[in-house]
Image (cartoon, rainbow, N blue to C red):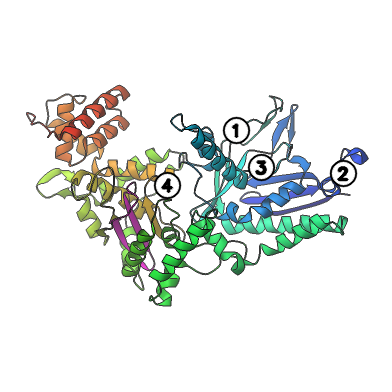
Amino acid sequence: MSWEMQSGDPLNFAFKVAFTRNPHGDEDASQSEDRESWGSFSIYVDGENLTAHRENDELVQGSHWYLLPLIEWFIEFWDPLLHEERLPLKNVGESAAVAMEKTKLPPLSLKEVDEFDWMDSWVRWWTRHNVRAAREGGLFPDVYIRRYRDELEISTGGETLPGVPRDTAFLWANRTYRVQVATVAQCLYEVLTGAVAELRRRLPYSERLTALEVRMTSLVQGEARRTDRLAWLSGLGDQVEQFRAVSDQVDDALRAVDNDVRQALLGNELESPLVVSGTPYARLLYGALSPDIELSDVSSLATALVSNYVPDSKEWLASIDAVALDERKLGQLSPGEQGSRLGEDACEQIGMPVEGAALAIDVERVLTDLGVSVSGMRLSDANLRAVSVVGPFQKPHVFTNPNFAYGRHEANPAVHRFTLAHELCHLLLDKEHGDELAIASGPWAPVAIEQRANAFAAAFLMPSWLLREALVDTDGALDDIETISVLADRLQVSLTSLVDRLLNLGELTYDDRIRLRTVAQQRSRRGARAPRLDLK
């Protein structure tokens, strides 16, 4: 007897499960629940069937196998699947599939005991997020599912399975998709509920299926599971005690705050009984944007967000939105290429020179004119460059980290200016649903977003026409460290950022970059000043 159910729109997201005749018949020695669950499943995203594959020169549209382990896996790992964004080891690559491939093997520098910890962390995260964790011998696609800011990321790898013929391959390997979390949750829940009910109808006395039905029902108990889901959202789902400490600190910091302010910061409403949203400010406070946030940082961030609260920030949002940058037409470009194009576009619209220094862009004045406040906030994670926030109830504000390891803002104007241009990109381009933004620029921010912001900052501070004008005034060769030093000084940027910008514009080779950056770092350690160069 066959049974089939699909939920959703394949052009956006859809999930399909079908129970079909077991080809092994009475000779199947599996447990009765597994035997009855033989069938196929399909996952569709953006019109592409991620389970479609070629097998023996035949196009197969679904993955056929015992499906009960897959159903159990979805139910068991529901909360991390839909809420956990933070990767287990390093934030490398633009998707979970890419990052997990890059971090599968531990670094050579790790000691043997640390290698086991590395591999354990990798496997635990993979088990929570990769569909193949439920395959139990079946031919399943290499699909990762994880939260990505206010969306859900579905990414595919291309790893081959052991023992599978070479001519067997999934059609949509190495892809990344982003869809609405609530849409995916609803589609999965409807099909899983129907599948469990069908198996229960076939085997009404099965204890395994009875227990599974109870767990299935618990998925819609949103209030009861809210704490667990917030923990996964914060990146602390498997560190419950640490999350409780952070949660208590947030509660203490906001205890005396009006309910309207608290609601605007934490967004306590449920997106659906199946999944929580949480504002970007809540993710910031609970530590989702850096694993090294300390309790003292939580208090600092909460105090800053409360002080930055306004009943209505339409005036500030309108000022930012008036900068017309169309990123949609650049969708096929890499994040770095997007940032370069958009940075120059923004500089053309709102850039202005520093008074008395015609070749330096006055990014501080640009932010002031846009209504963006800038202040310092010391954070314990020295890898965090700054935190930027904006939203319907948050004025646009950049909080620079005086503890930043790669250049103290108060002591290094070039680093400070680059940081401000970097954060300007976030404010202009990276707001989430509802015009909200709270991002901590550092190694755990989304890779593509950070790459784009770095390229934007370089192009905004060093647009091609300004570099051309600067080059006209010098006799020096562009691949000469003395020339580069003088130009960096006149543009008020770091020597290394200028070298990278010239490389991206095709004015330097990679060999030039390595040589010039090496010399620049040596000079920086010695505290050498830029030489004077004869100008035309």
Q: Quadrant of residue 375?
A: bottom left
Query: What residue is pinned by disc 2?
Result: 21
Amino acid type at mark 3 = Ala
Task: From the viewer's perspective, tell me whether residue 467 is left or right of residue 185.
Answer: left
Magenta segment: 378-399
Q: Magenta includes 19?
A: no
Amino acid type at mark 2 = Arg
Pointers 1 and 3 in contact (C-beta within 8 Å): no
Residue furthest to the right = 26
Which numbered mark, 1 or 3, is in the foreground of this view?
Answer: 3
Task: From the viewer's perspective, tell me whether residue 187 is left or right of residue 307.
Answer: right
- x%, y% of residue 477? 17, 24
Q: Magenta includes 390?
A: yes
Query: What residue is pinned by disc 4?
Result: 444
Relative to 32, residue 395 above or below:
below
Given residues 256 and 259, the one toward you in this image is 256
Relative to 166, residue 90 above or below:
below
Which numbered mark, 3 or 2, is in the foreground of this view?
Answer: 3
- Find the distance from the CA under tag 1 to the CA under tag 3: 15 Å
Q: Earlier in the sequence, mark 2 or mark 4?
A: 2
Query: What residue is pinned by disc 3?
Result: 133
Task: From the viewer's perspective, tell me whether residue 336 is left or right of residue 74.
Answer: left
Circle 4 — which element?
A: loop
Residue 279 visible to the viewer: no
Residue at horizontal 38 percent and vertical 75 percent from the top: 257
- x%, y% of residue 226? 57, 65
Query: What residue is pinned by disc 1?
Result: 158
Task: From the viewer's perspective, tell me whether residue 266 is left or right of residue 214.
Answer: left
Q: Earlier in the sequence, mark 1 or mark 4?
A: 1
- Find the distance from the CA under tag 2 to the CA under tag 1: 30 Å
